[in-house]
Amino acid sequence: MNQDKKNKIKILMKQLKSIDEEQREVIAGELGITNPEGHILSTRNQCLLVFQAGDNPLSVVAGFKQWQKSGRIVSKGSHGYLIAVPAKNKADGNEEEENETFFLYKTVFDISQTEVLELEEA
């Protein structure tokens, strides 16, 4: 991960910690940001998106490949937003060890930053 991305994540986490759970719920309740399958994003991720988007409206977000699977392509020059995606460390074969959960930061794009994927006719 490059230093710019690390710095951006630190700033976002600081912003997230600066608001209490009630404020987070209000933000998420007003927006209802979903993925293309209609699943509502976590309160945490909706807040992260709001911090980054500013006045840009967000409604449906997905990663580059997820948009392709949905028949859309990210518009050239679009800048995405970071969200936290849970992942698990695989235990080293020791069944007594629990898998540790951590977060990866992935880039997503709003539907307004995409276009319908046009299939070339043969």
Image (cartoon, grey):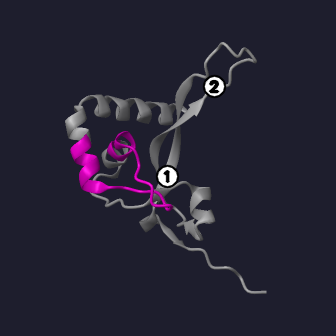
- Disc assigned to residue 34: none
| Residue type, numbered disc 1 | Val
Please give left or right for residue 106 compared with residue 121 in the image: left
Examine the rendered structure and indicate whether residue 41 appears above or below residue 14: below
**Which image quadrant for residue 100?**
top right
Q: Which residue, as the protein is rendered here, is positioned at the far bottom?
A: 122
Examine the rendered structure and indicate whether residue 69 appears above or below residue 86: below
Q: How many neighbours does mark 1 have within 10 angstroms: few (below 14), some (14-19), or many (20 or more)?
A: many
Q: Is residue 1 visible?
A: no
Q: Nearer the viewer, residue 30 or 110?
A: 30
Q: Which residue, as the protein is rendered here, is positioned at the far right?
A: 122
**Which image quadrant for residue 58?**
bottom left
* Residue at image coords 56%, 62%: 67
Q: Nearer the viewer, residue 75 or 95?
A: 95
- Disc assigned to residue 108: 1
Q: How many neighbours does mark 2 have within 10 angstroms: few (below 14), some (14-19), or many (20 or more)?
A: few
* Residue at image coords 47%, 52%: 80
Q: Residue 95, position in %: x, y?
A: 70, 16
| Residue type, numbered disc 2 | Asn
The residue identified by callout 2 is 89
Quarter of the figure that contains the C terminus: bottom right
First of labels 2, 1 by sequence position = 2
Q: Is residue 63 visible?
A: yes
Quarter of the figure that contains the N terminus: top right
Please give left or right for residue 116 compared with residue 21 in the image: right
Describe the element under mark 2 as helix, strand or loop: loop
| Extent of the magenta region | 25-47
Q: Residue 46, position in %: x, y?
A: 35, 47
* Residue at image coords 36%, 42%: 48
Q: Residue 7, position in %: x, y?
A: 43, 31
Between disc 2 and disc 1, the foreground one is 2
Question: Would residue 95 be counted in the magenta stretch?
Answer: no
